[in-house]
Image (cartoon, helix red, strand yellow):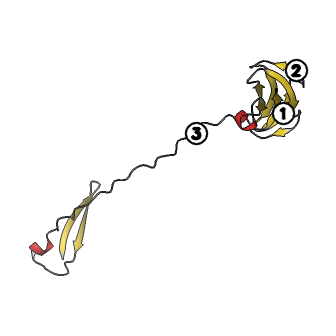
Amino acid sequence: MKQLRITVDGKSYDVSVEVLEESNPADTAPAAPAPVRSAVVRAPVAAPIAAPKPAASAAGPGTVVSPLAGKVVSIDVAVGDAVNAGDRVATIEAMKMNTFIYAESDGTVAEVTAEPGQMVDEGAALLKLS
């Protein structure tokens, strides 16, 4: 038995250690650590986020579409009305907030495809301009 003193976090402990077999000190010399080959790890690359395509192009020229899902609060034009680009043509409510919808081009209202109180999805046609 060997008596040893071990210090852990500044506190000393006296311990007894039993030596099981005597060996040549050269045999017990710590072996050189094997070389460690580090792997190169690359961070994952996120796919680029594509800008949303304007829904009007999918619905055809002159179609005014809803930019978000929600409830139609009002359609502010009627068939036959002349509108200019930038005129407010409808209002959509989503998450208790009103979003005004504006005409993207000049034209005459040819058809109204939504009505107040109707639930619409993003990209749904609200009206068509000619």
Measured in 3D between alpha carbons, the distance from the residue under mark 3 to the one under mark 1, in whole angstroms, is: 28 Å
Q: Is residue 104 above or below residue 6?
A: above
Identify which amino acid the numbered label 3 is placed on: Ala
Residue bearing the label numbered 1: 72
- Image depth: mark 2 or mark 1 in front: 2
User: Disc 1 on helix, strand or loop?
Assistant: strand
Tell me if label 3 and label 1 are in contact, CB under 8 Å: no
Measured in 3D between alpha carbons, the distance from the residue under mark 2 to the one under mark 1, in whole angstroms, is: 19 Å
Identify which amino acid the numbered label 2 is placed on: Asp
Residue depicted at x 70% and y 34%: 57
Residue bearing the label numbered 2: 81
Position of 35 with respect to 72 (left or right) is left
Observer-nearest of 26 and 130 = 130
Residue depicted at x 80% and y 31%: 92
Tell me if label 3 and label 2 are in contact, CB under 8 Å: no
Measured in 3D between alpha carbons, the distance from the residue under mark 3 to the one under mark 2, in whole angstroms, is: 36 Å
Name which quarter of the figure residue 20 lies in. bottom left
User: Which numbered circle lies on residue 50?
Assistant: 3
Position of 117 with respect to 101 (left or right) is right
Pinpoint residue 24: horizontal percent, then vertical percent.
9, 77
Pinpoint residue 87: horizontal percent, then vertical percent.
78, 19
